[in-house]
Image: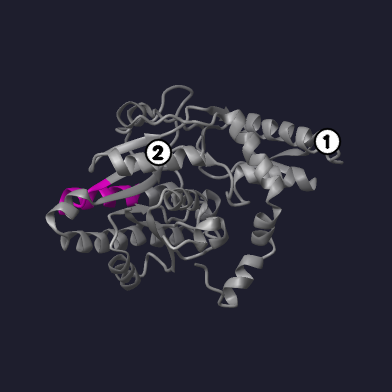
Amino acid sequence: MKRILVTGGAGFIGSCVVRRLVEAGNMVVTVDLLTYAGHAESLGTALDVPNHRFEHADIRDRRAVRRIMGLARPHAVIHLAAESHVDRSIDSPLEFVTTNVQGTVALLEAATDYWSGLGNTARRRFRFLHVSTDEVCGSLGSEGAFSESTPHRPNSPYAASKAASDHFARAWHRSFGLPVAISHCSNNYGPYQMPEKLVPVVILAALEGRPIPVYGDGENVRDWLFVEDHARALELILKKGMSGEVYNVGAEAEMTNIRLVRAICARMDTLLPESPHRPHADLIEFVADRPGHDRRYAIDSSRVRRELGWQPAVDLQEGLDLTVRWYLENRWWWRGIRDGGFEDRRRQGLRFG
């Protein structure tokens, strides 16, 4: 059994990682501030097992981070905690700087102090995985893909904050020897994704008969990665990846936003034959584009496939079907977020795990 510290473990990707690690028998300590993007309910049955512990903490709190590091005594750290919504970063960029940059530095400092005090064998085996995004690389033209050596050219406050955190993670490896690996992923989708993200926005608007907003002309291209496939890749990078290296994770499943939206609407038509809103594609409404909206992302994930043996197991069509079905069958979860029920439980002081 390995002891693994996961920051941002109650978020979309983080909760998927935690659920998998706990199910595999690892001892996992989840750290999450439970902001708008983190909900302990997303951890599912991991909340109730003896090999999981939940710590409600802010990674910007250096004292709390050091306390938790000493408590967890991890063999590895997976750092996923981040402010991650581009639109929110445009409205409130400073929050993204403090969490994504200052929080990452606080965690790197605590991890380095902890790692420095380990014995030789434990020091060699320790790993720190910094999870980042392809958005740090900016926008692509109609051809090509981001590689691990593509320069950082961020175009949004969110992407800039993640790019800065990448640089600090690399600097900590080079300056202090901390065994850090960095991963860049393409656009994730799947169960437990926050309702403000594109895929759940479409599903919920179609379900409720509201306009489905699509930015600009809808021709922006993204490489769509099912969250379970991403979590598997992170496990492999943690286990087999080399410190000081970068690994790109993408499904090579490019699709324009408008095609994706129409595909989701078609699934809603099939799954809800009695819906008064069919055909759901009639609800699509083009809206003003957001500032700095990158035109195309695509990831070359050949390295993680070749060196670590990773392959996506879920193609885009299957993944969309699984995701739509999950949101239709788990209305308690997204309703708990939208109506404030989860936040009410926090204010009442209820403990999780």
Quick check: marks 1 and 2 in contact, CB under 8 Å? no
Q: Which mark is residue 189?
A: none
Q: Which mark is residue 233?
A: 2
Q: Nearer the viewer, residue 313 or 214?
A: 313
- In the image as oriented, which residue stretches furthest toward the bottom? 348
> Magenta region: which residues?
163-180
Q: CA distance from mark 1 to mark 2?
A: 37 Å
Secondary element at image label 2: helix
Position of 278 with respect to 63 (left or right) is right
- In the image as oriented, which residue stretches furthest toward the left? 120
Q: Quadrant of residue 343?
A: bottom right
Q: Is residue 25 visible?
A: yes
Q: Amino acid at mark 1?
A: Pro
Residue 23 x, y percent position in the rendering:
46, 50
In the picture of the structure, the residue carrying the numbered disc 1 is: 273
Q: Nearer the viewer, residue 123 or 193?
A: 123
- Along the polypeptide, which appears first: circle 1 or circle 2? 2
Q: Nearer the viewer, residue 29 or 341?
A: 29
